[in-house]
Image (cartoon, grey):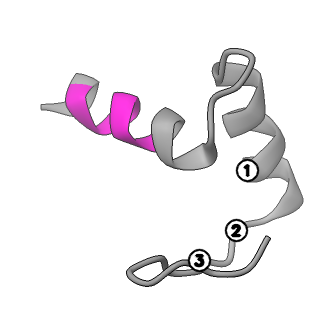
Amino acid sequence: MPFAKGVTTIQISPETRDKLKALGAKGDSYDDIIQRLLKKAK
């Protein structure tokens, strides 16, 4: 997928990626998952 304007790349370990993926629902992007986690953290 080509990078869209305003999208950044962050480096995470494969372990962290797998943990994020496990928290997501079908069709969720990593951004969706992280946004939900940030809302819960507030």
Quarter containing the C terminus: top left
Q: Is residue 27 above or below residue 8?
A: above
Residue drawn at (65%, 22%), measured in percent from left and top?
Answer: 23
Do the numbered discs 2 and 3 sit on residues whose CB atoms are within 8 Å? yes
To which residue does mark 1 refer? 16
Query: x%, y% of residue 9?
Result: 59, 80
User: Magenta stretch mostly in which secondary structure?
Assistant: helix
| Three-letter code, disc 2 | Ile
In the image, residue 14 lies in the stretch drawn in magenta: no
Tell me which label, 3 or 1, sits earlier in the chain.
3
Judge the density around disc 1: few (<14), some (14-19), many (≥20) Cα neighbours within 10 Å: few
Q: Which residue is mark 3?
A: 10
State the image coordinates of residue 38 (x, y, percent, origin top left). 29, 38
Which of the 4 quarters of the picture holds residue 25? Answer: top right
Rendered view: 28 above or below 17? above
Q: Name the residue carrying label 2.
A: 12
Picture quarter with the N terminus = bottom right
| Badge 3 density bin: few <14, some 14–19, many ≥20, Cα 10 Å | few
Element at label 1 = helix
Q: Which residues are magenta?
A: 34-39
Q: Is 38 within the magenta?
A: yes
- For the residues carrying marks 3 and 1, which lies nearer the camera in this image? 3
Label ID, residue 41: none
For image coordinates 61% across by 46% down, the residue present is 30
Callout 3 touching callout 1 (CB < 8 Å)? no
2 or 3: mark nearer the eye: 3
Q: Amino acid at mark 3?
A: Ile
Q: CA distance from mark 3 to mark 1?
A: 12 Å
Residue 29 lies in quadrant:
top right
Q: Which amino acid is tagged 1?
A: Thr
Q: Residue furthest top?
A: 25
